[in-house]
Image: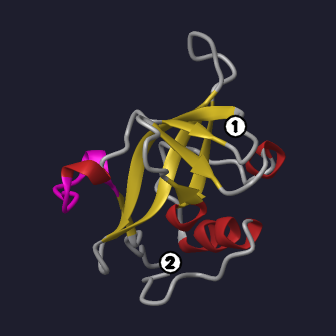
Amino acid sequence: MEYVEPNLVKLSGSDFHLEEAWQDIRGFDVYDVNGDKLGTVGDFYIDREAHVTRFLDVKAGGFLGIGKRHFLLPVEEVTRKVGEEDRVTVNHHRDTVLDSPDFDPEVVPDLAFQRNVYGHYGRPVPEGSST
């Protein structure tokens, strides 16, 4: 079987850069539509061909690393409101995010997993995506 390089690259492990400093929301708190805190933005996954951010890696829960989970969120599902410093909002309820496909941040998500995440949020794969 031929190895196919993933279409995504993790921002922190690449030579990619965000166009503007204000776009870097790593470390921001993530809340659901009801204002419940879900976790923190850990990193971005960037489409290596289109050079656009496709997903956020959100770290949630855990104490001393126990019970910690990661969620992959399509960037289209997250908003940043004017006046809300250091936080973003997922356009869904907590349960929808918690029920999203299990994500291992040590493995770059393959195309099937990415499609599964888009499907979970009822979103088509973006035009121009290398998925």
Q: Nearer the viewer, residue 31 or 56?
A: 31
Q: Which residue is mark 1?
A: 35
Give the number of the mark in front: 1 or 2. Answer: 1
Asked if the residues shown at circle 1 and circle 2 are in contact, with their CB atoms under 8 angstroms apart, the answer is: no
Instruction: Report the disc number at residue 1.
Output: 2
Residue drawn at 40 percent across, 52 percent down: 44
Segment colored magenta = 10-20
Q: Which three-letter amino acid code belongs to the residue tagged 1?
A: Gly
Mark carried by residue 48? none
In this view of the protein, which residue sits in the foreground, 86 or 24?
Answer: 86
| Total numbered labels | 2
Q: Is residue 110 left or right of residue 117?
A: left
Side of 84 relative to 30 (left or right): left
The picture places residue 70, in percent across and down from the top left corner, at 60, 39
101 relative to 36, above or below: below
Residue 2 at what x, y percent from top left? 44, 79
User: Residue 34: x and y, percent?
Assistant: 76, 42
| Element type at mark 2 | loop
**Residue 124 falls in which quadrant of the image?**
bottom right
Q: Is residue 68 left or right of residue 6?
A: right
Residue at 41 percent of width and 58 percent of height: 45
User: Could you say whether the residue bearing mark 1 is in a helix, strand or loop?
Assistant: loop
Q: Mark 1 Cα within 10 Å, few/some/many (few <14, many 20+)?
A: few
Q: How far separated are the C-alphas under marks 1 and 2?
A: 46 Å
Quadrant of the image occupied by residue 62 = top right
Q: Position of residue 49 (x, y in %)?
A: 30, 79
